[in-house]
Amino acid sequence: MNLNAPQNLADEQDKIIVSANALVKSSRLVPRSIRYQVARFCKLEKMTPDEYLYRLTPGSLKAAQQQGLRVQHLLTLLRHHAKNVPPSLVKALKRWDGQGNEVEIYRPLVLSVKDPEMLNVLRSSKASRYLSKLLGPTTIMVNEGSQEKILAILAEIGYLGEVEEN
């Protein structure tokens, strides 16, 4: 029985490439054990025959955390096996480790009225349970899927509205 590695395999000596924008590139010539460890912290963005492209996200870091991995493990891994670790990314990872997710981007539904008093009436009605964050005197966020309910309540209290389709 031959337990040696197959001959003619490329030497796995490459380094990981880490970008300040949280992208992590790994060629197939990065040692397999290192690629595996990186993958545990990242979301796979793209895979080609020669390269893996990963992104560090709050979700991927949380998944790693649930496996018992810590940001300090990732930083140690990157410091030893990456060509360069951007200081801004180190700062972001440490902030996430201490503060959790600090930024969210989402597509809200926004209700806009012409008169602030209309919004006050709506907020005092049974529609209030479908309303979310107040954005200004004439705008408020609406819970997803409640557009038709709010339009019905608006009609009941004397206002007609419509949902603008993009």
Image (cartoon, rainbow, N blue to C red):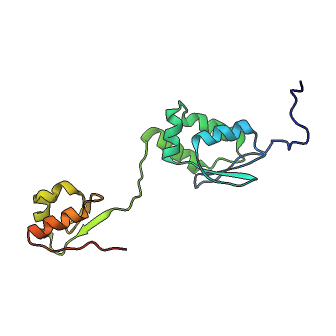
* Residue most extreme to the front: 1
Residue at x 57%, y 35% (from the top left corner): 72
Dividing the image into 4 quarters, which one contains the C terminus?
bottom left
Dividing the image into 4 quarters, which one contains the N terminus?
top right
Residue at x 15%, y 74% (from the top left corner): 160
Image location (x, y in percent) of residue 130? 21, 57
Q: Is residue 79 visible?
A: no
Left or right, 31 with reference to 146: right
Against 111, residue 88 (above or below) is: above
* Residue nearest the observer in this picture, 60 or 83: 60
Q: Tally the marks.
A: 0
Q: Quadrant of residue 139?
A: bottom left
Q: Quadrant of residue 11?
A: top right
* Residue nearest the observer in this picture, 47 or 112: 47
Left or right, 149 with reference to 10: left
Against 19, residue 110 (above or below) is: below
Residue at x 9%, y 67% (from the top left corner): 156
Residue at x 81%, y 41% (from the top left corner): 12
Image location (x, y in percent) of residue 149? 20, 62
Q: Quadrant of residue 39?
A: top right
Q: Is residue 133 visible?
A: yes
Image location (x, y in percent) of residue 119? 15, 66
Left or right, 20 with reference to 142: right
* Residue most extreme to the top: 1
